[in-house]
Image (cartoon, rainbow, N blue to C red):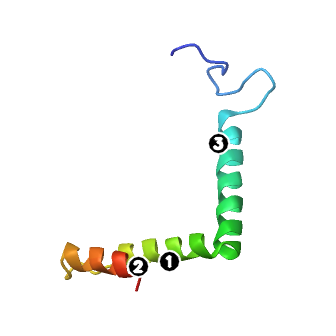
Amino acid sequence: MSKSDFDKNGIDKSGTHWLQYAALTVSAFVVYTTWAYYNDAGFHYFVVKIFKFLNCKGYNPISYCIMRWENGY
């Protein structure tokens, strides 16, 4: 596990820093999820459910938050 193609500065043989690989991966993920959010109704509904669950107030019991998740409102 200690063998790496990156030097001590984080640059590989082709001159690419490891953060550039991470940025490309994150960018591809963001582009795909944005496309899916606007073009796939099921994914859009899933994201809305996640935000509604995360937006559940601290005064409500967890059972209320789970009920909102199951009912989708």
For the residue pair 45 and 18, the one nearer the viewer reads as 45
Query: Do callouts 1 and 3 mark residues in contact (Cβ within 8 Å)?
Result: no
Mark 3 is on which residue type?
Ala
Contact between marks 2 and 1 (CB within 8 A): the answer is yes
Secondary element under disc 2, as helix, strand or loop, is helix
Report the mark closest to the observer, 1 or 3.
Answer: 1
Return the residue at label 1: 48
Location of residue 27 in the rendering, given as x and y in whole percent from the top left corner: 69, 54
| Quarter residue 63 falls in | bottom left
Residue under label 3, please give it: 22
Q: How far apart are the alpha carbons under marks 2 and 1? A: 6 Å
* Vertical relation: 10 (above or below) 45: above
Residue drawn at 64 percent across, 71 percent down: 37
Label 1 packing within 10 angstroms: few (<14), some (14-19), many (20+): some
Residue drawn at (73%, 24%) of the image: 12
Give the distance between the C-alpha atoms of the residues marked 1 and 3, in whole angstroms: 27 Å
Coordinates of residue 67 in the picture (x, y in percent):
28, 79
Looking at this view, name the residue that lies furthest to the top: 3
Q: Amino acid at mark 2?
A: Lys
Badge 2: residue crowd in 10 Å (few <14, some 14–19, many ≥20) = some
Q: Where residue 53 appears, x then y in whole percent?
A: 37, 74
- Could you tell me which secondary element the residue under label 3 belongs to? helix
Q: Earlier in the sequence, mark 2 or mark 3?
A: 3
Residue drawn at 66 percent across, 19 percent down: 7
Residue 52, disc: 2
Numbered disc 1: secondary structure: helix
Q: Amino acid at mark 1?
A: Val
